[in-house]
Image (tube, helix red, strand yellow):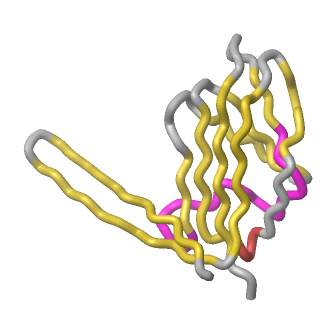
């Protein structure tokens, strides 16, 4: 059964308002819902992603944390309460630079931080 990620976009400036919605569909999903321990570096999160299959990414933390994608080691700085949202064929570059064998987090914010990650993929 297909799985969908629906990304809803809202924009407003004064009385001008625009809205849009994009639906991404795949046949598999990896979901992460963890509390990230404070004062720790490079703690693993069990996530494996094949870049060519990735359709949609959603990551959010309640506090500033760093997420590192291994093996390429590109680091994503998640800002408190601001989700990272990406979908295939949109205007932004995928946050991952290569296939991912694991994610690692670094949390130095002074408190434990909830983390949510949803990764949608489509097998060929």
Q: Is residue 86 left or right of residue 124?
A: left
Q: Which residue is drawn at 75% across and 69% down?
A: 51
Q: Along the line of sight, which residue is nearer the eye, 121 or 79?
A: 121
Q: Residue furthest top?
A: 110
Q: Which residue lies furthest to the bottom in this view?
A: 124
- Which contiguous range is marked in magenta? 88-104
Q: Residue at x 41, y 69 (%)?
A: 22
Residue 35 in the image: state x and y as whole percent: 73, 30
Q: In this view, does 21 lie to the left or right of 70?
A: left
Q: Give the quadrant of the C terminus.
A: bottom right
Q: Residue at x 35, y 56 (%)?
A: 9
Q: Along the line of sight, which residue is nearer the eye, 118 or 1?
A: 1
Q: Is residue 113 left or right of residue 88?
A: right
Residue 46 in the image: state x and y as whole percent: 86, 49
Residue 14 in the image: state x and y as whole percent: 11, 39
Q: Give the quadrant of the N terminus.
A: bottom right
Q: Is residue 57 left or right of residue 74?
A: left
Decide: is 68 above or below 54.
Answer: above
């Amino acid at each position: 059964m297909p799985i969908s990620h629906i990304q809803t976009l809202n924009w407003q400036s004064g009385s001008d308002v625009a809205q849009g919605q994009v639906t991404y569909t795949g046949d598999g999903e990896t979901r992460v819902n963890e509390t990230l321990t404070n004062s720790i570096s490079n703690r693993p999160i069990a996530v494996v992603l094949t870049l060519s299959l990735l359709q949609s990414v959603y990551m959010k933390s309640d506090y500033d944390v760093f997420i590192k994608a291994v093996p390429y080691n590109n680091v994503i700085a998640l800002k408190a309460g601001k989700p990272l949202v990406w979908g295939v064929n949109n205007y932004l570059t995928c946050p991952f630079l290569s296939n991912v064998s694991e994610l690692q987090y670094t949390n130095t914010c002074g408190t434990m931080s909830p983390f949510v990650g949803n990764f949608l993929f489509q097998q060929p």
